């Protein structure tokens, strides 16, 4: 048996439609096998809470081996995993094609799915991961104004902590007074210019977060496309990509959302559109998770192949000689964070490359988990851990006293901003940097007006 592997990791489909997938005893046997390998290796101890939890359970057990851990306590390891995929992509030497065939994140996903099927999820988790239902608060100015104002108050945060399990001190997104989709309109009239690497026309998958919470990110993307004379269509209708439901193991809801979205996106993919999603987790869902959940669906594969990270597309457009570089406004000093779900797409540092095209930028790039991880980092029981995981990121990004901090993940950048504010308070610093999405920074560098002003 060879030790480790230098080959590129590969992923096997998640066979969730077969009875063995849902069998608890079969699952426990696989958890025990994988946990035994992980305990003997310990290479991933610094990544998240799952591995320290696992190692402590084993080390403090009756035998000092996995067989000394009661199987009901395996759940403690599973609950600490937020499916960032970093262990699979960057650390584990035993991923396929190694014969030990470890895929820790997808094993955790399987355990979450079995747990969900047997016991469901907390009502609060069901509600908070139903992003289209939660998003109904958005788009009505008087309602959003009241809801946002109430959510900022300490009493309301205490109530939300008790009722929904959301940590009172965790950053929370606010609702937009007008949704992205209410204001965004297709612009198909620009001349079509295909490049060697890039389709010349784009379809925009809004994402729940951009649509309901920060529509400015989407409008900044549209301004950049307009400036570069790239015709674009707004996807006719869409629902959540399914990532929040995936993270709690609700695979039936993932399947329902997949059917709705693929029906909208597949014709665009067949017609040669590059499909752009401004939130890395959403792009990853279509590029990786759905094709592994539905490996026999040709339309799912086709959409996955047509899905682009916006900066992957823009940098490829630059290589085609079709991107304008007439930047006018220096950004100053920028600390940029590469989210885990951008790294997992295996596209390289395309956002960094784009920012480096702007004039006189002083750029610091940080590749490490911010700790937010969607709903996980907002939960009462995990928020302190999320801040602990993110602290090295907060410290590194604050070192250069940046004018801006930025991350492709809009949740992560606000989590980082909260962490930096905490560091500044501890050090008595007066100024906190501005948190801005990289698309916003590129729009500013082009000298384009704020579409929301």
Image (tube, rainbow, N blue to C red):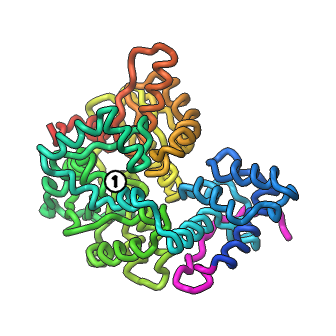
Residue 412, position in %: x, y? Answer: 44, 43
Q: Residue at x 41, y 71 (%)?
A: 254
Residue in front for this viewpoint, 295 or 109: 109
User: Is residue 267 left or right of 415 when viewed as pictured?
Assistant: left
Q: For the stretch drawn in magenta, what is the main secondary structure?
A: loop
Residue 215, position in %: x, y? Answer: 23, 48
Image quadrant where one finds the C terminus: top left
Q: Residue at x 61, y 58 (%)?
A: 89
Residue 277, position in %: x, y? Answer: 34, 58
Q: Residues within 10 Å of mark 1 (few under 14, many from 20)?
A: many
Query: Total label count?
Result: 1
Measured along the vertical axis of the image, is residue 135 above or below residue 357?
below
Is residue 46 shown in magenta? no
Image quadrant where one finds the N terminus: bottom right
Q: Residue at x 21, y 57 (%)?
A: 136
User: Is residue 412 left or right of 62 when viewed as pictured?
Assistant: left
Q: Dot 1: what SS?
A: loop
Is residue 4 shown in magenta? yes
Residue 34, position in %: x, y? Answer: 73, 66
Measured along the vertical axis of the image, is residue 95 above or below residue 300?
above
Report if residue 229 is visible in the image. Answer: no
Magenta-tinted stretch: 1-23
Quarter of image, res 122: bottom left
Q: Which residue is mark 1?
A: 278
Report if residue 121 is visible in the image. Answer: yes
Residue in front for this viewpoint, 54 or 302: 54
Q: Residue at x 72, y 66 (%)?
A: 71
Residue in front for this viewpoint, 23 or 265: 23
């Amino acid at each position: 048996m060879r030790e480790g592997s230098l080959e590129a990791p590969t992923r096997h489909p998640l066979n969730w439609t077969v009875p063995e997938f849902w069998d608890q005893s079969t699952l426990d046997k696989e958890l025990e096998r994988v946990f035994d390998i992980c305990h003997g290796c310990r290479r991933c101890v610094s990544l998240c809470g799952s591995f320290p939890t696992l190692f402590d359970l084993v080390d403090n057990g009756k035998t000092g081996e996995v067989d000394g851990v009661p199987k009901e306590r395996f759940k403690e390891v599973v609950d600490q995993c937020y499916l960032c995929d970093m262990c699979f992509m960057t650390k584990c030497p035993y991923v396929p094609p190694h014969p030990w065939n470890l895929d820790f994140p997808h094993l955790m996903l399987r355990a979450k799915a079995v747990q969900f099927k047997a016991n469901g999820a907390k009502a609060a988790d069901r509600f908070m991961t139903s992003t289209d239902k939660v998003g109904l608060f958005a788009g009505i100015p008087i309602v959003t104004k009241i809801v946002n104002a109430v959510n900022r108050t300490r009493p309301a945060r205490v109530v939300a902590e008790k009722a929904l399990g959301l940590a009172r001190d965790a950053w929370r997104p606010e609702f937009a007074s007008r949704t992205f989709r209410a204001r965004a309109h297709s612009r198909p009239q620009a001349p079509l210019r295909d490049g060697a690497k890039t389709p010349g026309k784009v379809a925009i998958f809004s994402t729940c977060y951009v649509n309901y919470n920060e529509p400015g990110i989407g409008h900044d993307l549209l301004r950049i496309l307009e400036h570069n004379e790239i015709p674009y269509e707004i996807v006719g209708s869409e629902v959540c990509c399914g990532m929040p439901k995936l993270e709690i193991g609700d695979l039936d809801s993932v399947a329902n959302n997949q059917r709705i979205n693929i029906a909208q996106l597949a014709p665009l993919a067949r017609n040669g559109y590059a499909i752009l999603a401004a939130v890395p987790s959403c792009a990853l869902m279509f590029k990786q998770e759905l094709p592994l959940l539905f490996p026999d669906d040709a339309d799912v594969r086709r959409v996955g192949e047509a899905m682009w990270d916006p900066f992957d597309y823009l940098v490829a457009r630059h290589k085609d000689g079709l991107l304008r570089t007439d930047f006018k406004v220096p950004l100053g000093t920028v600390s940029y964070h590469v989210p885990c779900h951008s790294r997992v797409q295996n596209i390289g540092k395309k956002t960094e490359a784009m920012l480096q095209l702007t004039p006189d930028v002083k750029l610091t790039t940080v590749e490490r988990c911010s700790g937010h991880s969607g709903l996980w980092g907002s939960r009462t029981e995990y928020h302190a851990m999320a801040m602990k995981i993110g602290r090295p990121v907060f410290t590194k990004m604050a070192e250069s006293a940046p004018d801006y901090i930025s991350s492709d993940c809009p949740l992560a950048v606000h989590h980082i901003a909260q962490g930096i504010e905490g560091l500044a308070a501890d050090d008595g610093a007066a100024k906190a940097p501005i948190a801005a999405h990289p698309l916003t920074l590129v729009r500013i560098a082009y000298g384009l007006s704020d579409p929301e002003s």
